[in-house]
Image: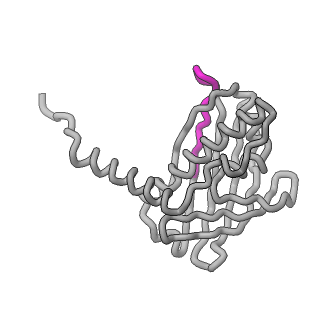
């Protein structure tokens, strides 16, 4: 499934792009991600833990930078992993582009996500909502990291968003209910004149 999103950062595109070239720093901003080792020039291994209420999936795998375009400020990362309890697999292709915006930069992120096994049993809407919650937390953590780099003060790990499983589940359910509300309670445009 293709998931498209974007967020704004109050830093110049060059500073944001420099941040994206530090893969361990980028990974530290994603709640549940732990980049354990660099195994090649653009190859990393690690884990990602996703908790949503009573559901906990822990994927161990690898991430590879497939493309890096400094002039276009674009990076393509391919990641794949298997749940450590054997309940499924995930593959993700991320295409991120940093562009100038009025207040600094806009980061556009396209994610092509493929799930199999138990992880694939969750509905498309729930997966999109969980992804949106995690990306929101990533953006908040990234802003903190960029601010810390600007001021020269290290970000305390406790200051970064490390969203709990119940919080993620609650936020995802709230997004789903918002979609249902808009679908059933907002008036449809008239088709007759």
Q: Furthest residue to the bottom?
A: 86
Q: Furthest residue to the top?
A: 102
The quadrant of the image that shows the C terminus is: top left
**Residue at position x 59%, y 22% in the image:** 103
Quadrant of residue 125 within the rendered picture: bottom left
The magenta span reads 100-111
Figure disc tally: 0
Instruction: Pinpoint residue 82: horizontal percent, then vertical percent.
Output: 65, 71
* Magenta stretch encompasses residue 102: yes
Of 84 and 56, which appears nearest the observer?
56
Q: Is residue 180 left or right of residue 61?
A: left
Instruction: Pinpoint residue 11: horizontal percent, then vertical percent.
Output: 68, 27
Instruction: Pinpoint residue 37: horizontal percent, then vertical percent.
Output: 83, 61
Q: Is residue 151 left or right of residue 80?
A: right
* Magenta stretch encompasses residue 149: no
**Residue at position x 61%, y 36% in the image:** 107
Against 139, residue 13 (above or below) is: above
Instruction: Pinpoint residue 36: horizontal percent, then vertical percent.
Output: 80, 62
**Residue at position x 78%, y 41% in the image:** 154
Against 23, residue 8 (above or below) is: above
Quadrant of residue 87 within the rendered picture: bottom right
**Residue at position x 55%, y 65% in the image:** 51
Residue 70, visible in the rendered structure: no
Residue 8, visible in the rendered structure: yes
Against 121, residue 22 (above or below) is: above
Q: Is residue 144 left or right of residue 110?
A: right
SS assignment for the magenta stretch, majority = strand
């Amino acid at each position: 499934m293709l998931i498209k999103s974007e967020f704004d950062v109050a830093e110049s595109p060059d500073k944001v792009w420099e941040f994206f070239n530090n893969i361990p720093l980028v990974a530290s901003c994603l709640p549940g991600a732990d980049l354990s080792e660099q195994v090649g020039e653009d190859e990393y291994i690690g884990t990602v833990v996703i908790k949503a209420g009573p559901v906990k999936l822990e994927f161990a795998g690898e991430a590879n930078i497939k493309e890096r375009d400094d002039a276009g400020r674009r990076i393509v990362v391919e990641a794949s992993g298997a749940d450590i309890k054997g309940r499924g697999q995930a593959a993700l292709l991320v295409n991120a582009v940093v562009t100038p915006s009025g207040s600094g930069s806009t980061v556009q992120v396209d994610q092509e996500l493929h799930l199999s096994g138990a992880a694939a049993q969750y509905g498309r809407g729930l997966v999109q909502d969980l992804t949106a919650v995690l990306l929101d937390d990533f953006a908040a953590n990234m802003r903190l990291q960029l601010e810390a780099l600007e001021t020269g003060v290290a970000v305390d790990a406790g200051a970064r968003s490390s969203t709990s499983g119940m919080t993620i589940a609650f936020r995802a359910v709230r997004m789903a209910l918002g979609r249902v509300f808009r679908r059933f309670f907002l008036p449809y445009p008239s088709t007759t004149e």
